[in-house]
Amino acid sequence: MTRPFAFTLTACLTAAVAHAATTPTQTAPTPAQNAARVAVARETAQVRALQRNGGLKAVKVTGSCAGRDNIPLLKVWADAKGTPRLVQYQRFYPDNSQSFTGYYDAAGRLRYAKASASGFIGLLYNVTTEYDAAGRQVAESGTRRPGWTQDLLRLPGLNPDLLKRGICTR
């Protein structure tokens, strides 16, 4: 009776070793990537502190940014100079949803973005992406459905630059 268990255990171990041999290893981040990620963390913390301390004011968004029940889909907060620093967009329907939260630096560049979307086939993506001051992606974590490989800046139906200006993209 113990023989089938031993066979099953051996088969599982063999499969795990084979999978480990074919799984690519991750490379260690470079010092430049680490420095860029630290800068992103500082920018994001600064925006959160501004929001917590009342340093951000709500920006008027277009009328097309209201859902079926007139609840705003888009919220944009700008600093004292009028630069959008925090953008939140959420659209929920029975068979699909999309959400985006973006943190922008004082120059108006997207530095940290968190986005997710689902459709009638299930989750499409749920990712967090960090960008350096030049707009290059320095880190991404999360899940993507096969075929959804585009950068958050170029995803269909999601345009962070328009959202930042208070314009919904449908």
Image: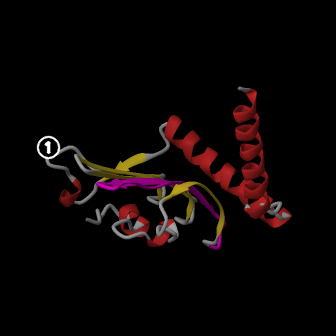
Q: Which residue is mark 1?
A: 69
Which residue is farthest left? Answer: 69
Q: Main secondary structure of the magenta part?
A: strand
Position of residue 5 measured from the top left corner of the image (x, y, whole percent) = 71, 32
Magenta-colored span: 113-134
Label 1 sits on what residue type? Asp
User: Which residue: 49% across, 65% down?
Assistant: 146
Q: Nearer the viewer, residue 65 or 1?
A: 1
Which residue is farthest top? Answer: 1
Q: Is residue 68 above or below residue 1?
A: below
Task: Work out whether residue 76 can be spotted.
Answer: no
Q: Is residue 94 magenta?
A: no
Q: Is residue 120 magenta?
A: yes
Position of residue 169 measured from the top left corner of the image (x, y, whole percent) = 29, 66
SS at mark 1? loop
Position of residue 85 measured from the top left corner of the image (x, y, whole percent) = 49, 55
Position of residue 148 measured from the top left corner of the image (x, y, whole percent) = 47, 67
User: Which residue: 33% across, 56% down?
Assistant: 121
Q: Quadrant of the C terminus?
A: bottom left
User: Which residue: 28% across, 50% down?
Assistant: 73
Q: Nearer the viewer, residue 137 or 122?
A: 122
Please state if 154 lies on the left or on the right of 121 as rendered.
Answer: right
